[in-house]
Image (tube, grey):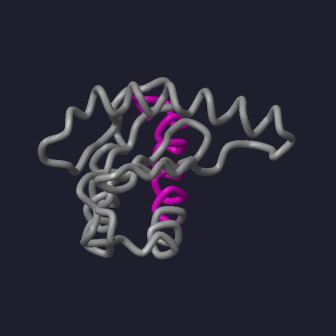
């Protein structure tokens, strides 16, 4: 996908702004890795699990009358996994240390999700040979 280098640049900028991030992934809503900035994590597994979690989160928000999916935050003993909508075709998943400021995580990730969504959606809207 033509947008992957721009998406990777956005992931790197996000990790610079949030040093407590231990990984950043952009994936299609069906679980394909678009870009990643993470060391020891299996990107394909994270993308597939993100797609599964996204499906459940979408059903949950719709069933409870909360509207379309925007974000999902999971806190584990070792830190956070946060997933954000990124346009209509992608999601942003972040791994963070337990000491991260969650408010700042949301602020920065929402902004990055918008930019990533624009890159991915624009690339999908353009004909490949244009």
The dominant secondary structure in magenta is helix
Task: Give the left or right position of residue 13, taking residue 125 as reference.
Answer: left
Residue positioned 44% across, 48% down in the render: 92
Can you tell which quarter of the image residue 58 is in?
top right
Q: Nearer the viewer, residue 15 or 81?
A: 81
Count of numbered circles on the image? 0
> Residue at the location (52% across, 32% down)?
53
Percent coordinates x, y for residue 57 in the rendering: 63, 36
Q: Which residues are magenta?
A: 111-130
Residue 22 position, x and y percent, is 23, 57
Q: What x and y, as percent, mark residue 61?
A: 75, 40
113 above or below 14?
Answer: above
Q: Classify residue 114 as left or right of residue 68.
A: left
Examine the structure image and report whether residue 129 is included in the region drawn in magenta.
Answer: yes
4 within the magenta span: no
State which quarter of the image contains the N terminus: top left
Determine the residue positioned at 47% across, 40% down: 123
Establish if 18 lies above or below 12: below
- Toward the viewer: 13 or 75? 75
In-front residue for pair 2/37: 37
Please, which residue is most extreme toward the left here? 40
User: In the rendered view of the protein, which quadrant contains the C terminus?
Assistant: top left
Q: Which residue lies at the image location 31% right of the left edge and 57% below the top edge? A: 11
Give the vertical position of 44 relative to 61 (above or below). above
* Outermost residue to the right: 65
* Residue 33, picture quadrant: top left
Instruction: Measuring from the top left, give residue 68's x and y in whole percent.
Output: 74, 42
């Amino acid at each position: 996908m033509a947008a992957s280098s721009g998406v990777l640049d956005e992931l790197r900028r996000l990790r610079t702004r949030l040093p407590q991030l231990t990984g950043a992934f952009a994936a299609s809503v069906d679980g394909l890795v678009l870009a990643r900035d993470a060391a020891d994590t299996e990107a394909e597994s994270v993308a597939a699990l993100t797609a599964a979690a996204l499906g459940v989160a979408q059903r949950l928000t719709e069933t409870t009358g909360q509207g379309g999916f925007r974000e999902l935050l999971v806190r584990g003993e070792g830190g956070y996994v946060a997933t954000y909508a990124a346009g209509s075709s992608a999601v942003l998943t972040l791994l963070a240390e337990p000491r991260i400021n969650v408010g700042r995580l949301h602020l920065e990730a929402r902004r990055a999700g918008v930019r990533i969504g624009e890159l991915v959606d624009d690339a999908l809207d353009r004909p490949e040979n244009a």
